[in-house]
Image (cartoon, rainbow, N blue to C red):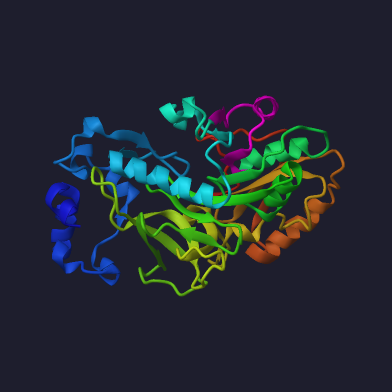
Amino acid sequence: MKHSYENVPFYHRKFDHAGIKPEHITGFEDLSKIPLTTREELQRLPLGTVTARDIDIEQCEKTTTSGTTGTPLTLILDRESVECGNAMWIRALERDGLKNRDKMAVIRHPGYFPKVHWFQRIGIRPRKNISALDNTERQITVLEKYCPQAIKGYSSSLWEIARTLEHRPHQIKPRLTFSGGELMSSQARKSITTSFDTEVFDNYGTTEFSLIAWECKEHIGYHINTDSLLIEFLDGTGESVLEGKKGAVVCTGLHNYAMPLIRYKGDDIAVPMDVQCPCGVKLPLLKGIEGRQSDLLITLDGRSISPWRFFPYPFDDYAGIIQFTITQERRDRIVFRLVLEDTFDMSRLDEARQRIKDLFGEEMQIDFRIIDKFDREKSGKIRAISRLF
């Protein structure tokens, strides 16, 4: 707090405007005295206003957020924060069983392929990067040739590969699978587990804060890396939510002195837990990620519907359905895009339409569009739920 106030013009003004000084922040409970920071605020300002004056930016790493929910945000990361982010990942992956000599295939956007480190050249933490923008058959070919002990990738990428492999013999049998970057549905988890014959560990991270929380072998929640960031869960009035209730995720990073982020409110919604995990890790838990604020669909009478309500709802199951996405284009219009098998019973669309009307209101317009395949976004992800207003 002291560093940010003295060296970052943006936070100096923010503190002054709120009438507080760094010495007023003596514990976690004092964070609420500081106004929230939003991505939109930072995007409107010159980089020199939001970065520290006593840091040599040329010695820092420059990156951007994925831009899944809008214009990407440019981030400046100092060496300590990059190393801390790497350490958070290593700790979680190794806790879940990854070994230093395990070959791991990583499916992600090519713009985020990391540089090759010296230790990887001698067989420590070897990695094979695979573009999430490649077609599924190409990804499978690379995986079969590489024979990784672990696979890590976007949930939708892993699911597409798993579905493709479901009914044919293959040699892709990793000991571990790690997912992230998107919501992990129960159906996707089941399909990946079945096809790869392995356990799936889901992770929650952002470009701004690296790995925020991760699943252990108990799978009762996600351990929060509270030694790398402070995290709050807030309701619409800015108050902390109770255990088991949905709240907006607000993070304060503890390691990036180049471009500090204090009480940074992104678009994510999650549910905190107040239980001790039997795995022995003392880090607190969050129950799960509910999605993004902009992913919440709105009923005609104003209620918010979580993305977790769907998949397979409004269908009973996935019989004949390869994948579908949902877009609320207007307050009174929802569009379903579906990739279907030839065996799909089209009469099920009428049943699904009525269920959606029962939930959202009889005047809601429901449009089903049958497509051949989904095109990935520039980020390499597939956005399963979105709201355009």
Is residue 329 visible from the viewing direction of this image? no
Residue 224, image x, y percentages: 45, 59
Q: Which residue appears at 14% of the width and 47% of the height?
A: 7
Left or right of 306, for residue 212: left
Q: Nearer the viewer, residue 46 or 142?
A: 142
Q: Nearer the viewer, residue 4 or 337?
A: 4
Toward which corner of the image does residue 380 lie, by quadrant? top right
Is residue 95 visible from the viewing direction of this image? yes
Toward which corner of the image does residue 101 lie, by quadrant? top right
Q: Nearer the viewer, residue 358 or 229?
A: 229
Left or right of 24, for residue 174: right
Q: How many marks?
A: 0
Query: Is residue 116 within the magenta segment?
Result: no
The span picked out in magenta is 127-155
Toward which corner of the image does residue 300 lie, by quadrant? bottom right
Left or right of 207, for residue 3: left
Q: Nearer the viewer, residue 229 or 324?
A: 229
Query: Is residue 139 within the magenta segment?
Result: yes
Residue 324, image x, y percentages: 69, 45
Residue 50, image x, y percentages: 22, 44
186 is higher (above) or lower (below) than 34 = above
Q: Which residue appears at 20% of the width and 57% of the height?
A: 1
259 is higher (above) or lower (below) than 62 = below
Q: Which residue appears at 23% of the width and 38% of the height?
A: 47
